[in-house]
Image (cartoon, rainbow, N blue to C red):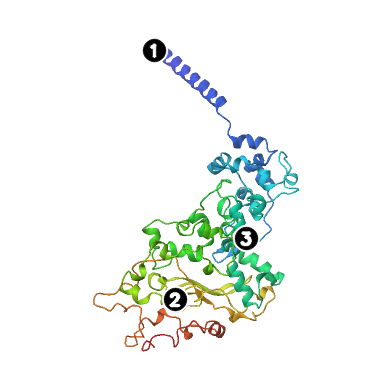
Amino acid sequence: MKKALLFWICLTGIVFMVILHTACVEKRPVAESDRAATKIDSCAGCHTSYQTLQELADPDTDPPAEGCGGAAPHIEPFDRVFLGGPGFEQFKNSIHGQIGCTSCHGGIDNTADKQEAHSGNFVKSPSSVPEAACGDCHYDIVGNVEGSLHQQGWGQKRSVAMRLGYDSFDQLPDRIHEGYEQNCATCHADCGSCHVTRPPAAGGGLARGHDFQRTPDTRDVCVSCHSSRGGHAYFGLGVGTSPDVHLTKAGFVCTDCHGQKNVHGDGNIYATRFESPLNPSCDDCHPGMEDGNAYHQAHVGDLDCYVCHSQAYNNCGSCHVGGEGARIPSHLSFKIGMNPIPENKPYRMALLRRTLAAPDTWSNYGVEKAENFDAKTTYNYTTPHNIQKWTSRTQVDAGDTCYANCHIRPDAPENHNRELYLFEKDLKEEWEKTANKHIVVDGRLPEGWE
């Protein structure tokens, strides 16, 4: 009798659980993505259906973006345009999410036909035409972007034109423009590259389900492009180096120093980034440092801050665009030389970084040898993002002289500290010697150093 009663109690419980489960399933709200998967006759409907995007995706035909940081990671075409995850939920509830897809992208909504949806005035990347896509709401920023060094890369364009013997980048042959766009311009950002998508150097495509990021993420956005130099130094990735003190002590991200005006520009076109008055300066946070101690008093106006407070940083050189790439591979180095841009920076000596230029850099694009190559140095003024208060030059052993680790000392073994400076014999190629003849330190150092 007890066994029979126990049996019916168990059976009743099982039936109750089945009924309860069924009720929960029937009442479970259908996710937006599930609904979209069954109805794709709209922009959002198609782009929230991962299966549909896989079926409709065209294979990539363009070569992957290449830059100083190497080839961009490959992200599947359907992954680049999928609307999903918490980012998409945030986007739907944002101001931009209420505007409507066709307001920015053009094309035709409420159709399941991909070709029709992407017809007419469809624009894949609205920020490629910022006046039309962003100008109505962000007119002040869009009005300045034409002069933005961050987007346009005027300094790099100017260097290419000068070395090839042209007055401006616009005058260069079409093949050089093609090579520049395919190889050099992958890190030049439009609005979307920083605020909506991954930069091309990071693989492109939507970064967070189309959600707009007012402040670009330092690692995911800024360092995607500024990887081989800025990010590599700032996070202390080089062997034997330490992260920048502004990261470890203050927790700074890029935009703490490089604010909106610095990045977006002020509407004026500057030939190089060092001409812009919008750049951050050490004095912004450290006023009065010229009188801070005896070392600053001795060297103010003579040495830039990085000569003493930087560490070894990435260098490379002799790039063959569209071919072998950098034939002098990335390596850590530290070189002090004569300031190549005294018109922009008021120092006699500065840190120099070996750059990519070589006479045959553009040989794959119809220029066997740059006719005006010596118009620019191949060691450029540099500002490494790896600052430390105490470095191998500012800290000396007890009882040693204050200049023990920076002055050349002929009386010491192997001319102690000579390796810190750029001498002519450090330049291996004849074209390097002629291009850099006015910035090497030969004959320009204090008497007795050499």
Specify whether 149 is left or right of 172.
left
Residue 379 at what x, y percent from top left? Answer: 51, 77
Residue 305 at what x, y percent from top left? Answer: 40, 71
The residue at which mark 2 appears reads as: 347
In the image, residue 197 above or below residue 336: above
Instruction: Pick the residue in front: 171 or 316.
Output: 171
* Label 1: how many Cα within 10 Å (few below 14, some 14–19, many 20+): few
Instruction: Inspect the image, locate mark 3, and give the three-letter code of the amino acid beneath it.
Output: Glu
Q: What is the CA distance from the residue labelled 1 to the residue labelled 2?
A: 99 Å
Q: Are marks 3 and 1 in contact (CB under 8 Å)?
A: no
Q: Farthest top residue?
A: 1
Residue 121 at what x, y percent from top left? Answer: 73, 49
Q: Earlier in the sequence, mark 3 or mark 2?
A: 3
Quadrant hosting residue 318: bottom right
Residue 419 at what x, y percent from top left? Answer: 41, 80
The residue at which mark 3 appears reads as: 146
Q: What is the CA distance from the residue labelled 3 to the residue labelled 1?
A: 88 Å
**Which residue is rendered at x = 53% and y = 42% of the image?**
86
In the image, residue 152 above or below residue 158: above
Q: Point out which mark residue 265 bears.
A: none
